[in-house]
């Protein structure tokens, strides 16, 4: 049995999206980041970082959301590029997103629209935007040449990057039309809508 640790209101959102794409049944430990359950010795044995998401797949324990999705897609032979070069592109985009956007987009959206106005720190939003905007330029260039990030069809590469960009759904990215269309194409998938509903319930 697969167990997924982490609330949809965390980076586990992308794990829950992948599980829905693959039609997997799972036991869900619906824990928020920093919830007391994540601070126990038992959970630290699963993820020594005390962070979510993590999975326990019949005793195989794995953390890091991008690695989890690459593993699940490969194991279940769906959304995982068969061609080695497309596979490598899936790794490239997953690692790139983690480096260039994963925290930056959250900081930008929180401090520009999501937090109550009194709690926003405009300087933090501005600093984050200086990293987010060039990364969106990179996606725009890639998506002006191809519909998907790693090969001819939607794959784990698209899920990992679009899943991590959930926060971008709440800002106007129309300045990057190909990126904008791709982001909404990804999130229009039934499995994405299912994961989003878990978060927004
Ligand atoms: N690189 C990790 C990041 C995991 C992570 O930072 N998760 C956050 C929730 S989205 C967390 O558990 N934070 C708890 C904390 O900061 O103590 C991944 O992609 O899985």
Image (spheres, rainbow, N blue to C red):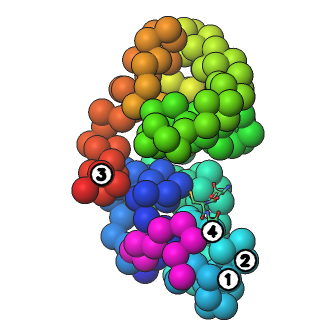
Report if residue 98 is visible in the image.
yes
Q: Is residue 99 magenta?
A: no
Label 3 neighbourhood size at 10 Å, few (<14), some (14-19), many (20+)? Answer: few
Question: How far apart in space, not on screen, are marks 2 and 1 (Cα)?
Answer: 4 Å
Question: How far apart in space, not on screen, are marks 4 and 2 (Cα)?
Answer: 8 Å
* Left or right of residue 93: residue 116: left
Q: Secondary structure at mark 3?
A: helix
Name which residue lies at 51% across and 24% down. Answer: 148
Per the image, the residue denoted by label 1 is 44
Question: How far apart in space, not on screen, are marks 4 and 3 (Cα)?
Answer: 21 Å
Per the image, the residue denoted by label 2 is 48
Judge depth for marks 1 and 3 and give the one in front.
Answer: 3
Judge depth for marks 3 and 2 and give the one in front.
Answer: 3
Report if residue 162 is visible in the image.
no
Mark closest to the chain's N terminus, 4 or 3: 4
Question: How far apart in space, not on screen, are marks 1 and 4 (Cα)?
Answer: 9 Å
Disc number for residue 200: 3
Question: How far apart in space, not on screen, are marks 3 and 2 (Cα)?
Answer: 28 Å
Q: Is mark 4 within 8 Å of ligand 1?
A: yes
Question: How far apart in space, not on screen, are marks 1 and 3 (Cα)?
Answer: 28 Å
Per the image, the residue denoted by label 4 is 51
Where on the image, by quarter, is ligand 1?
bottom right
Provide the major secondary structure of the magenta segment: loop
* Left or right of residue 89: residue 2: left
Quadrant showing the N terminus? bottom left
Query: Is label 2 in contact with label 1 (beta carbons under 8 Å)?
Result: yes
Q: Secondary structure at mark 4?
A: loop
> Which of 176 and 34 lies nearest the eye of the viewer?
34
Q: Start and end of the magenta stretch?
A: 28-36
Q: As displayed, is residue 70 above or below residue 1?
A: above
């Amino acid at each position: 049995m697969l167990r997924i640790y982490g609330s949809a209101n965390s980076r586990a959102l992308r794990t829950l999206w992948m599980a829905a794409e693959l039609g997997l049944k799972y036991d869900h430990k619906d824990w928020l980041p920093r919830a007391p359950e994540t601070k126990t010795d038992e959970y630290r044995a699963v993820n020594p970082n005390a962070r979510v998401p993590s999975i326990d797949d019949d005793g195989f324990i794995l953390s890091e959301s991008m690695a989890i999705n690459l593993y699940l897609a490969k194991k279940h032979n769906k959304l995982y590029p068969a061609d080695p070069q497309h596979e490598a592109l899936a790794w490239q985009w997953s690692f790139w997103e983690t480096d260039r956007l994963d925290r930056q987009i959250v900081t930008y959206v929180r401090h520009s629209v999501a937090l109550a106005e009194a709690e926003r720190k405009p300087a933090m939003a501005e600093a984050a935007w200086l990293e987010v905007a060039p990364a969106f330029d990179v996606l725009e260039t890639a998506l002006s040449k191809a519909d998907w990030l790693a090969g001819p069809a939607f794959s784990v590469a698209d899920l990992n990057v679009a899943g991590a960009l959930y926060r971008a759904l709440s800002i106007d990215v129309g300045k990057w039309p190909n990126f904008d269309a791709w982001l909404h194409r990804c999130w229009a998938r039934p499995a994405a809508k299912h994961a989003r509903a878990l978060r927004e319930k």
